[in-house]
Image (tube, helix red, strand yellow):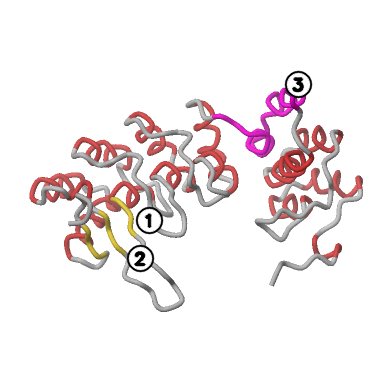
Amino acid sequence: MTGGSLLLPVDDPLAVAVSGAIRGGDLTTLRRLLTAHPGLATARLVDRPAGPDVPGVRSRTLLHVVTDWPGRFPHGAATVAVLVAAGADVDARFAGPHRETPLHWAASCDDVDVIDALLDAGADIEAPGGVIGGGTPLADARAFAQWRAGYRLVVRGARTTLTDAATLGLLDRVEQAFTGVTRPSSGEVDAAFWGACHGGRQSCAAHLWERGARLDWVPPWEHRTALDAAVRRGAVELVHWLRAQGGRTAAELGHRPPA
């Protein structure tokens, strides 16, 4: 026990059993294990160090197991309810390179049912710490093209940045961003334009281009221009439009990723 939480190596028989019950949607076994092992609901599963090139030890909660990739496990929403009723912390953090909550992971897996279950249980929809710039669950959803999750988070009240709105194709919110006293910075416009192309949202991309977005901007998180992003998305009409405006790929620009 450390800090009040039971620590279990991921290959411990109890960790294997409870993880298997969660991934298989076996609520009967899950309830039995939670009853037989007090404190299991708040346990942390600890990854053994992978070697000298992987510093530190990572750990996750059982709610992270529910929401782990690829997600959408059987009876996921009911599993969340069982774990929360047993004392699981809905906003517990992954301990590792990033600090994602279970809601971040559910958003990254497009698991709408589990998103609803977590939010119904009180999860913080604006929790920071995501893999994408330390952002919110919505930032993870739109960055990983998990559109159902992104729209669901918006419906449930998530705040949208300009990039969020552009990537999801929420043109009204993109337009509104330019009506206030404080206008978006050039960097925000560039990032939102890239996001619109990543999402295949031509109307948003056109609106942002008219407001000064740079066609050939390459973001720090990915070695692709807006044209590259649109090609990857398969947005044929948007690709033609970008070419017509003079858009180029990173390869055509001779842009190389940092060493």
- Helix, strand, or loop for circle 1? loop
The quarter of the picture where residue 69 lies is bottom left
Give residue 83's position: percent from left, percent from top.
23, 41
**To which residue does mark 2 refer?**
57
Which residue is nearer to you in this view: 176 or 21?
176
Distance in Å between CA atoms under marks 1 and 3:
40 Å
Q: Earlier in the sequence, mark 1 or mark 3?
A: 1
Mark 3: amino acid: Val
For disc 2, the neighbor class at 10 Å (few under 14, some 14 to 19, many from 20) is few
Residue at image point 33% right, 54% down: 60
Q: Earlier in the sequence, mark 2 or mark 3?
A: 2
The quarter of the picture where residue 210 lies is top right
Residue at image point 51% right, 40% down: 136
**To which residue does mark 3 refer?**
181
Which residue is nearer to you in this view: 54 or 226?
54
Mark 1: amino acid: Ala
* Quarter of the figure with the N terminus: bottom left
Q: Mark 1 touching mark 2, by CB under 8 A?
A: yes
Distance in Å between CA atoms under marks 2 and 3:
47 Å
**Residue span colored magenta:** 159-182
Q: Earlier in the sequence, mark 1 or mark 2?
A: 2
Magenta span has 257? Answer: no
Mark 2: amino acid: Val
**To which residue does mark 1 refer?**
95
Give residue 221's position: percent from left, percent from top.
65, 56
130 to 87, vertically: above or below: below
54 to 243, vertically: above or below: below
Which residue is nearer to you in this view: 62 or 230?
62
38 to 207, vertically: above or below: below
Q: Nearer the viewer, mark 1 or mark 3?
A: 3
- Helix, strand, or loop for circle 3? loop
Give residue 118's position: percent from left, percent from top.
36, 35
